Image (cartoon, coloured by chain):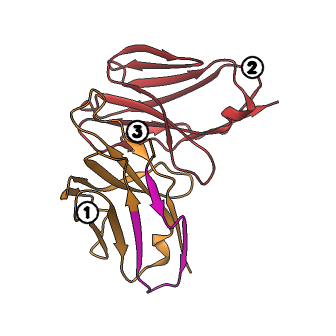
Chain colours: A orange, B red
Amino acid sequence: DTGVSQDPRHKITKRGQNVTFRCDPISEHNRLYWYRQTLGQGPEFLTYFQNEAQLEKSRLLSDRFSAERPKGSFSTLEIQRTEQGDSAMYLCASSHTGSLDADTQYFGPGTRLTVL
Amino acid sequence: QKEVEQDPGPLSVPEGAIVSLNCTYSNSAFQYFMWYRQYSRKGPELLMYTYSSGNKEDGRFTAQVDKSSKYISLFIRDSQPSDSATYLCAMSGDYKLSFGAGTTVTVRA
């Protein structure tokens, strides 16, 4: 049973560049979430998918951010025209509805983004 | 005011001591409560999950929920140096988790 995986683990980019992160959820988990965590804070919700449908986006998710889950399996999070304030750990989590612990989200290792 | 308040610590205890962590919350809609452990530069790892008031025990860990006071706790018995990490409380009413800021714990050998 493999857990949630994320790629890349680290990304260093220059301000103004575009970056894309990938998340592979636990197999058969139909919900997938993106969170952002800055130093000394807990993760903050960005968006979530049920299967391929994006059902909610936080107001934290500016127009420069876009997320997709085209086939209801892996997901990508793209940040366009990166800013230094985008530097953070981007976490992906997944869960399975219909189980007793449907709200139990399992997290991946995260992608640490540094914008220079 | 944040929805979930958690004392960031840091907390330092000797090996074998009981670690006591807690969070308060303001949103009455929260009905699922979790504790995650996070090592430096890693993703959060689920420790405990509960949805009812009362105690839930799993090995050395005990989670306590008091919905009337909007207060949750995590106790770690017989703490070990490997328990040194940041502990995050999390809660939800539907699907998205609201986290506390995390408490950094160091268990001294």
Tell me the SS state at disc 1.
Answer: loop
Q: What residue would you read off at disc 2?
A: B16
Q: Position of residue B44 (x, y in %)?
A: 50, 44
Residue pictured at 41% horizontal, 24% vertical: B71
Region rendered in magenta: A4-22
Q: Position of residue A24 (x, y in %)?
A: 38, 57
Judging from the image, mark 2 belongs to the subunit labelled B
Image-quadrant location for residue A17: bottom left
Residue B104 image label:
none
- Residue A108 in the figure: left or right of residue B28: right
- Residue A61 in the figure: left or right of residue A41: left
Alpha carbon distance from label 2 to label 3: 29 Å
Q: Position of residue B9 (x, y in %)?
A: 63, 38
Q: What residue would you read off at disc 1?
A: A69
**Looking at the image, residue B100 lies above or below residue A34:** above
**Looking at the image, residue B106 lies above or below residue B69:** below
| Quarter of the image with the C terminus of chain B in it | top right
Kind of residue at badge 2: Gly
Image-quadrant location for residue B52: top left
Residue pictured at 56% horizontal, 81% vertical: A116
Q: How many other residues sit within 10 Å of disc 2, few (<14), some (14-19) or many (≥20)? A: some
Tell me the SS state at disc 2.
Answer: loop
Alpha carbon distance from label 3 to label 1: 30 Å
Kind of residue at badge 3: Val
> Do the residues marked 2 and 3 share a common chain?
yes
Residue B4 image label:
3
